[in-house]
Amino acid sequence: MNINRIIICWAFCIAITNIHWKADTKPDYKGEVMKTLRKQILAQAGWALQQQPVTVTAQSSPRSAGGKHDFFSEGDYWWPNPQSPDSPYVQRDGMTNPVNFVEHRLAMIRLSQIIGALASAYELTHDDKYVKQALQHCKAWFVDPATMMNPNLQYAQAIKGRFTGRGIGIIDTIQLMEVVQGLADMENAKGMDRQLLAAIRNWFERYLQWLTTHQYGKDEMNATNNHGTCWVMQTACFAKFTHNEKLMQFCRDRYKTVLLPNQMAADGSFPQELRRTKPYGYSIFNLDAMTTICQILSTKEDNLWNYNTPDGRNIRKGVEYLYPFIADKSKWPKKPDVMYWDNWPVAQPFLLFGANTYGNNDWFNTWKKLDHAPEVEEVIRNLPVRHPLIWL
């Protein structure tokens, strides 16, 4: 009888242990991402190994009020006035003018793609050749006096006849996020040049100084839509790279007290984005940015993924609101976007980050099935997290 009781107790304990183990475990999403993207990552890194640096000094525009080393771009939705071609440009919201100067932005996107691919390949292989190639490009952009970009965005998203630059143009440097994330991912590699890395960090320290003190930076920080979100997202990313804990905490507080309560409705939607001419694309973009903030800034002590406003709004509601329209776009309740409607969604980072945080396999499986290598310029521009492996 005693032996039977021992056997029963032993079996019961094993069963309970298994139940607890299954409850406490979460799928290995990083491993799944590696398997899903491995072939693509190595192909992209192979391309990146063949590329030579191209910085802002490679091309210029006579409409820029800045110099050779100054980043310059023009507002996307601004067009010549049909009544008078020489007069100031006029706005057509949501309609991209294809002849505006965007070569500097494209060069920055290219840099992001190169560093993201190289860092992802390093994460898979730990081969120092990827590190050395990444440093070659970053040296050209941020250190070499002949080719480097000045650490400010005073001439971004200019409008002919109206502004030589605007705070709204600061959104263009979200393309530098995967550059610093990739460098951080490779920081402890044997092939890392510590002196060069310090010089690159110094550039971002100077850029953060401009970003947080210049009136353009203040204007962008106070924007009430995705621009305000993206100011926090990139500032948090650069602050983490430069070990600026004070600025990281400022960004956490701003997420809690400004972004979430002022931008999210009770149902998890973003009304400021829904009223635009491209509500679907902008809603996706803003949610990607919000979840990336949570991914960058969350700690065990201060987990933004679990933060709730006093009236119950949280980032999970944002994912839950938008997810059904990602899984089945035909359910979208508003009119189709005026441009690029057919190009969304792609493999949105909010799906992966949300799945990785909350253990939601539906979100992950949807992410897995979507396009991981979009080629449409507008989609790429609004997808700053294109190499998810380096973020997990």
Image (cartoon, rainbow, N blue to C red):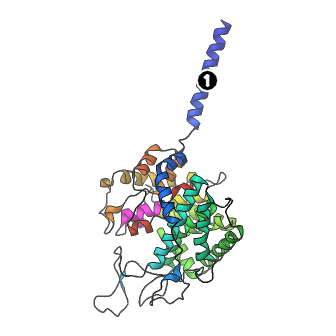
| Image position of 215 with respect to 341: above or below | below
Q: Main secondary structure of the magenta part?
A: helix
Where residue 210 sits, quadrant-wise, is bottom right
Q: Position of residue 83 (x, y in %)?
A: 28, 91
Residue 208 as seen in the image, left or right of residue 99: right
Residue at 55% x, 73% y is 221
The secondary structure type at the circle numbered 1 is helix
Q: Residues within 10 Å of mark 1 (few under 14, many from 20)?
A: few
**Is 11 included in the stretch rendered in magenta?**
no
**Is 278 included in the stretch rendered in magenta?**
yes
Picture quarter with the N terminus = top right
Q: Position of residue 197 (x, y in %)?
A: 67, 69
Q: Position of residue 166 (x, y in %)?
A: 49, 82
Depth check, front residue: 78 or 118: 118
The residue positioned farthest toward the right in the image shown:
195
- Pointer 1 residue: 14
Q: Is residue 105 visible?
A: yes
Residue 373 as seen in the image, left or right of residue 133: left
Q: Position of residue 151 (x, y in %)?
A: 60, 79
Residue type pointed to by label 1: Ile
Depth check, front residue: 158 or 187: 187
- The range drawn in magenta is 271-288
Total marks shown come to 1
Q: Is residue 155 visible?
A: no
Depth check, front residue: 356 or 321: 356
The residue positioned farthest toward the left in the image shown:
83
| Image position of 258 with respect to 142: above or below | above
Where residue 337 sits, quadrant-wise, is bottom left
Residue at 57% x, 51% y is 306
Residue 328 as seen in the image, left or right of residue 62: left
